[in-house]
Image (cartoon, rainbow, N blue to C red):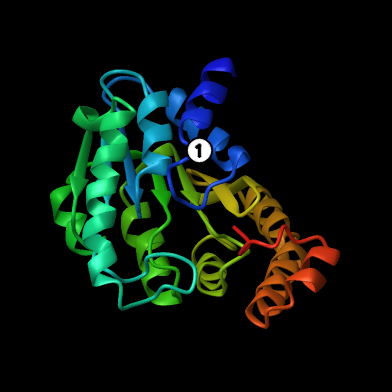
Amino acid sequence: MAEFKEVFASLKDVNGWMTEGQAHRLWNNAKALHPGARVVEIGSFQGRSMCVLATAAPEGVELIAIDPHGGNDRGPQEIDGFAEEAETDNQIFNANLERAGVRDRVTHLRKFSDAALVDVPGDVDLLYVDGAHRFAPASADIRQWGAKVVDGGHLLVHDSFSSIGVTLALSVTTFWSSQWTYEGRSQSMTQFRKGKNTLTQRVGSFIRQIAQLPYFAKNLLYKVLLSLKLTPVAKALGSTGEWPY
């Protein structure tokens, strides 16, 4: 825990949308891997989450970061039109990995996630999805990249029960799934284990995910209030005043 705290503190100036609890979930999943395992991250932005994954993963674990840094789906309410910032994001991403001492461990595929599928043949042990949040690309990431995850492997999805597109994607890929079992969440980061489940396990997983919908509704309310510049009202209802993630 002390090591994690030190690493997380070192990333305080690295831009990104990741709470300490979410970072700790990434850390624990990466730490549990064995040499020869593979981690794939979809959506790296400036490297905050990959620094956590790469620092926690034992030597011999392969780390792949997929992000086109293309100026679209850059962050909350930044869907398109950020081409100039994208090149800066790419430079900062590499600099942050270098500063964390993990640049040589990480393979960066500067491609859209669907185009990068052919570059990663074989299995994935830990998949972290924080890519485009619209329904079509989010569901495609979970389906296409999730198919590469080994039985017993894990899928982590950011902005679950926060983003409408991501939540809808989960509703068609994990809510009633014979292969993904819901294991919990840290704020909006959900965790699933892959492996054939029984009907009882599937029902339990479905119920646990449905139980998160009030949290989803609260996040949507906060977003509406923040968009209307009613931050004091949002804070009075429990919001931090930041876009929920």
Helix, strand or loop for disc 1: loop
Q: Name the spot of residue 199 as percent of width and height, x first.
A: 63, 53
Residue ranking furthest to the bottom: 228
User: Which image quarter holds the N terminus?
Assistant: top right
Q: Is residue 4 above or below residue 26?
A: above
Instruction: Residue at 30%, 72% (x, y): give it.
Output: 82
Residue 160 in which image quadrant: bottom right
Q: Nearer the viewer, residue 2 or 228?
A: 228
The percent coordinates of residue 186 (x first, y second) are 64, 45
- Whether residue 198 appears in this view of the structure is yes
Q: Residues within 10 Å of mark 1 (few under 14, many from 20)?
A: few
Residue 70: image location, x then y, percent: 23, 66
Camera-side residue: 134 or 91?
Answer: 91
Disc 1 residue type? Lys
Residue 146 percent coordinates (x, y) = 37, 53
Taking the spot 47% from the left edge, 29% from the top edge, the residue there is 10
Q: Residue at 44%, 74% (x, y): give it.
A: 134
**144 up-or-down from 54: above or below:** below
Which residue lies under the disc numbered 1? Answer: 12
Front-most of residues 23 and 209: 23
Viewport quadrant of the C terminus? bottom right
Please tell me whether residue 120 is drawn above or below residue 5 in the rendered image.
below
Q: Residue at x 30, y 20 (%)?
A: 35
The reply to whether residue 62 is in sight is no
Question: Horizontal placement of 183 versus 87: left or right?
Answer: right
* 200 sits to left or right of 69: right
